[in-house]
Amino acid sequence: MTGAKGHTVGALLKHRLILFSSAWLLIALVTRTAPMSAHEWSRLATVESLVERHTYMVDDSSFANTRNKIFNHGHFYSHQPSVLATIEAPVYWVIHAFGLRLSNNAPFDWAF
């Protein structure tokens, strides 16, 4: 079966996979590996809590020492909107499934 400009579907898939992998590698190389602001700490606390404790409460998070949290009904929550943390949580869930976890005391965020 041929696709656009006479290329086979397998060749098109291979080119797309190479493009995706290259873009992913470029993004990975320019991504910071440590939270730099209280906003990032707060969001990471939510991501960690969602994956490891299945809750938006950040009381027991290793990132709970952030200033950017609110106290409501006896628990702390990130003051950041939860949409971005909810989108990031599945990515961390996959990483967490391999035994890696977020850590705020390692040279990099990922620790064994």
Image (tube, rainbow, N blue to C red):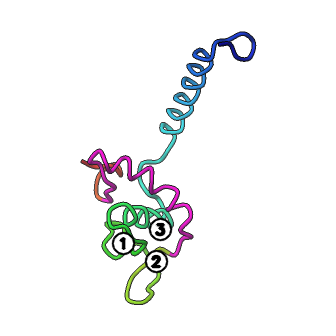
**Proximity of marks 2 and 3: CB atoms separated by less than 8 Å:** no
Q: Position of residue 56 (x, y in %)?
A: 43, 72
Residue 9, above or below 67? above
Residue type, numbered disc 1: Ala
Label drawn at residue 38: 3
Left or right: where 21 falls relative to 112:
right
**Residue stretch rendered in magenta on the structure:** 79-104
What residue did someone put label 1 on?
64
CA distance for labels 1 and 2: 8 Å
Please tell me the numbered disc located at residue 69: 2
Question: Does the segment drawn in magenta span residue 33?
Answer: no
Seen from the viewer's position, the closer of residues 88 and 5 is 5
Please give the label number shown on residue 104.
none
Q: Earlier in the sequence, mark 1 or mark 3?
A: 3
Secondary structure at numbered mark 2: strand
50 relative to 27 in the view: left or right: left
Q: Is residue 76 above or below residue 16?
A: below
- Which element is circle 1 on? loop
Question: Is 86 part of what is drawn in magenta?
Answer: yes
Question: Residue at (31%, 57%) from the top-left corner?
Answer: 103
- Ranked by sequence position, the earlier of labels 2 and 3 is 3
Q: Label 3 sits on what residue type? A: Ala
Contact check, label 1 and label 2, Cβ < 8 Å: yes
Amino acid of disc 2:
Lys
Q: Nearer the viewer, mark 2 or mark 3?
A: 2
Residue 7 image-quadrant placement: top right
Residue lying farthest to the right in this orientation: 5
